[in-house]
Amino acid sequence: MFTIDANTDFGARVLRRLRDEQVLWLTVVDRKNAPRSMPVWFLWDGETILIYSQPNQLKIRSIEANPNVDLHFNSDPGGGDVVVLLGQARVAPDAPPAVDNAPFVEKYHEPIAGLGMTPQSFSDSYSTPILVTPTRLWGF
């Protein structure tokens, strides 16, 4: 089972970033076997990463064809503080809609408003949940 060791400096840094940062990059493999990266909002629950997507997007089609994904944060300006999670993704219709996910709404309330949306309109537009189960971690 995948775990992050909070007792190491690196593990503590990873957990802080999973808790505090608002954007990470999701990399999928498209039908032509090319990697495609896109920034996404996410919620870490201690075991999985939940992402909400608009339906019929490249990331959805790619995950349905190949569930292997990478997730990574931006590095610091000097190229350090690198965190990459490898995992298995799936479209998760059993996950709650964004509007019913209180921790997600709390984390993204201001950015959602910044888009001129309400939690309900965001949830209506980004109606396809993706659940990523990390399997490996690396970085420095």
Image (cartoon, rainbow, N blue to C red):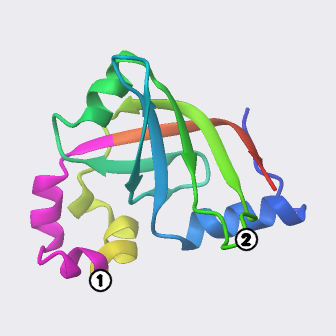
Residue at 90% x, 61% y: name it: 8
Q: What is the crowding at mark 2: few (fewer than 14 residues within 10 Å), some, or many (at least 20)?
A: few
Quadrant of the snapshot with the N terminus: top right
Query: Disc 2 designates what residue?
Result: 78
| Residue 6 appearing in the image | no
Of residue 69 and residue 37, the one placed in the foreground of this image is 37
Marks 1 and 2, the one that precedes in the sequence: 2
Secondary structure beneath disc 2? loop
Left/right of residue 87 with respect to residue 56 in the rendered view: right
Of residue 24 and residue 18, the one placed in the foreground of this image is 24
Using the image, determine if residue 50 lies above or below residue 106: above
Where is residue 46 drawn, in percent x and y?
A: 61, 54
Of residue 55 and residue 75, the one placed in the foreground of this image is 75
**Quadrant of the image occupied by residue 128:** top left
Where is residue 52 drawn, in percent x and y?
A: 30, 50
Of badges 1 and 2, the one in the foreground is 2
**Amino acid type, callout 2:** Gly
Residue 128 counted in the magenta span: yes
Of residue 80 and residue 64, the one placed in the foreground of this image is 80
Quadrant of the snapshot with the C terminus: bottom right
- Magenta residues? 111-129
Looking at this rendering, what residue extends furthest in the front direction?
Answer: 78
Looking at this rendering, what residue extends furthest in the right direction?
Answer: 8
**Quadrant of the image occupied by residue 62:** top left
Query: Disc 1 designates what residue?
Result: 110
| Residue 55 appearing in the image | yes
